Amino acid sequence: MSDSKVKLTVDGKELEYATIAGSVGPKVVDIRKLYAQTGMVTYDPGFTSTASCDSALTYIDGDQGVLLHRGYSIEELSEQSSFMEVAYLLLRGNLPNKGELDSFVHTITRHTMVHEQLSTFFRGFRRDAHPMAIMCGVVGALSAFYHDSTDITDPVQRMIASHRLIAKMPTLAAMAYKYSVGQPFVYPQNDLSYTGNFLRMTFSVPAEEYEVNPVIEKALDRIFILHADHEQNASTSTVRLAGSSGANPFACIAAGIACLWGPAHGGANEAALNMLREIGTPERIPAYIARAKNKDDPFRLMGFGHRVYKNYDPRATVMQKTVREVLTALNVSDPIFDVALQLEDMALHDDYFIEKKLFPNVDFYSGIILSAIGFPTDMFTVLFALARTVGWVAHWNEMISDPEQKIGRPRQLYTGPAPRAYLPVEKR
């Protein structure tokens, strides 16, 4: 709690509201008594200036381009850590020692299998169904198969459900891909890493042996780290809102997946890649930059700008380096990467983009990497959901454990008709 106060005058009456300081970042004004004391509510579309909760998981300073998980910078975590280590950090609060990490990895690995009846569940979908549509259905259906971990009042069951969701998401994502291409499902293999196992389940076939490429494995693991959590974004807020009603964890994560599917959220990297492909060659870049500046042209540069970041997205720096590593490992030259590099350079030296603080974000390069690895564009958001499940689960656990947790119930500014009398139909 901070000593400073905020004064508000309503109809000549002066009221004081305390401010609360976090460990870092801006203070917040505690307005929980505002409605009771004044009969008024705040108006904040999109919650751009509203803290809906307190959280110890992730901190973002958009002006400085800072992203921290439990105090650790995303640059250090993506360079030195593994996705499983970051998952432990977000879920448990601290980086694990070797014994703790080995135990956690063992637990997750032993939960990667899914109930065999789920394979028949997949067959209820059309072959051309979008993989995210399938993921919404099958993740929500997990609550029908794992009744022993849906009691949210039991901390042990909550942790079992958390482990199951983190472990089974790669299996379900790989199954969604295999179903879309008409190939048989591939079972998990316990001697592989979390990310290596996912690559094998996605790209191997029973007819031949599959060897995980360590560079690709590391690159995808890094992508998972970069997408693991991002504070109170739309899908995380959705998971928290669903969880505030007491819904089971599988239903909450399915709700997060549905929200992530939106093109303004999880589909941005697909849109950025499609834009780069549309531009095609470097000499066409100036024309597209001119279109982006034209207020009368609906075209926008995808992969630039961010709701939170008003500086270079720190994840984009890591992504650019990762693209080079992947293309080198695969011994391919992607002209789209050349377009991306030159587009970024031109935009960063253009007064229009500098003034509006439009810098590349994480989505600008991730689509190039995923496409080079072999993922079709409709799987991009599925991979995002796979990685973000860790953050969703951590936020859900944090919320459920909060003794002050209440069901989410935003207010509104009503703009409909004032009270009016009902008229019988023959008099209208």
Image (cartoon, rainbow, N blue to C red):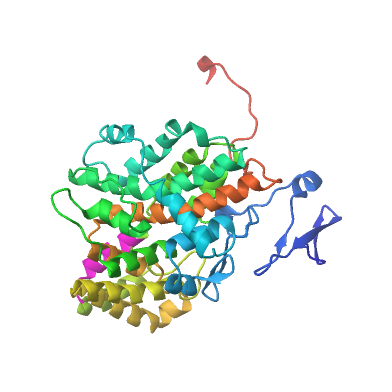
Residue 242 lies left or right of residue 403; in this view the side is left
Q: In this view, does 361 lie above or below 107?
A: below
Q: How many labels, in total?
A: 0
Instruction: Indicate the quadrant where residue 277 lies.
Output: bottom left
Q: Nearer the viewer, residue 397 or 246?
A: 397
In the rendering, at what x and y percent does residue 179 appear?
A: 23, 42
Residue 317 lies left or right of residue 421; in this view the side is left
Residue stretch rendered in magenta on the structure: 269-281
In the rendering, at what x and y percent does residue 143 appear?
A: 45, 34
Say which quadrant the N terminus sits in. bottom right
Image point (54%, 52%), residue name = 394
Q: In this view, does 65 lie above or below 89?
A: below
- Residue lying farthest to the left in this orientation: 207
Residue 145 appears in the figure: yes
- Residue lying farthest to the front in this orientation: 99
- Residue lying farthest to the bottom in this orientation: 349
